Image: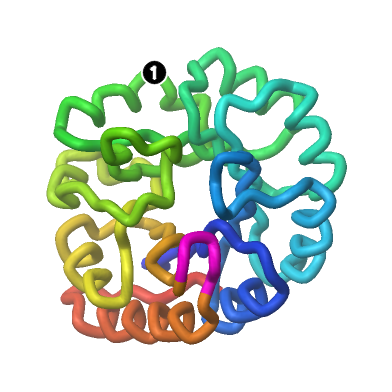
Amino acid sequence: MTLDIKICGLKTDDAVDAALSGGASHVGFIFFEKSPRHVSPAEAGRLAARVRGKAKSVAVTVDADDATLDAIVSAMSPDMLQLHGHETPARVAEVKARYGLQVMKAFSVRDAADLDAVAPYRGTADRFLFDAKPPKGSDLPGGNGVSFDWRLLAALDPGLDYMLSGGLNAGNIADALRQANPPGIDISSGVESAPGVKDPALIAKFFEAVEAALAGLPASRELTT
């Protein structure tokens, strides 16, 4: 079984190259002005060109309207759209129909009841992302460096395609993989030297930790390349 790895919130050539060098299957670009990881559609398009053919590019938006998505898709030509706001199942279906792209719907998790929100999206969203609920007072739906109880994901349907996010780093990734055994993982703040500043050395260290963690799991798994 392969493990997808998304490095999210990239803003520089060096960060993109480090993610690709490590073996990222997905790279994410964030379009949310309150985030220190925000990029313009034009800049994302330039960076995504470095990714094409090597990994999947993901445009991350928060309750974006059609005009905003039109600009992003036109400039960047992403492989996938990640909806990280309060988008309804109907909105997800609209986005898929409008752009003909895969859609990953994000959910904030604190306890088991939060996972019940997934059911109406099954059959519409192509993939899910489970992130920790943001701390009180935070304006950011993700990238807050906090985690949730990964053991909650053991109750999910084994066939559900998702990525685990929230507070991951080189020091805890082995525990996350052992407890949740996710099909994919997503990291942002855990490979930063400051908010929004990706550190190529931390990215490399994270991939090394993932490889070591996978080698220690009872079931044979490998990175998606």
Magenta highlight on residue 195: yes
Residue pictured at 33% horizontal, 56% vertical: 145
Q: How is the image coloured?
A: rainbow
Q: Quadrant of the C terminus?
A: bottom right
Residue pictured at 53% horizontal, 58% vertical: 8
* Left or right of residue 51: residue 119: left
Q: Residues within 10 Å of mark 1 (few under 14, many from 20)?
A: few
* Amino acid type of the residue that numbered disc 1 sits on in the rendered structure: Pro
Residue farthest along the top direction in this orientation: 90
Q: Is residue 5 above or below residue 89?
A: below
Q: Is residue 83 above or below residue 217?
A: above
Q: Which residue is mark 1?
A: 120
Q: Is residue 142 above or below residue 49?
A: above
Magenta stretch bounds: 194-198
Q: Secondary structure at mark 1?
A: helix
Q: From the top left corner, tell me how far across and down residue 203 is, in percent.
A: 47, 78
Q: Number of labelled discs? A: 1
Q: Quadrant of the N terminus?
A: bottom left
Q: From the top left corner, tell me how far across and down residue 17 is, in percent.
A: 66, 79
* Left or right of residue 149: residue 32: right
**Res 164 visible:** no
Q: From the top left corner, tell me how far across and down residue 127 is, in percent.
A: 47, 41
Chief secondary structure of the magenta portion: strand
Q: Is residue 137 above or below residue 166?
A: above
* Left or right of residue 153: residue 137: right
Q: From the top left corner, tell me how far across and down residue 4 is, in percent.
A: 46, 63
**Res 163 visible:** yes
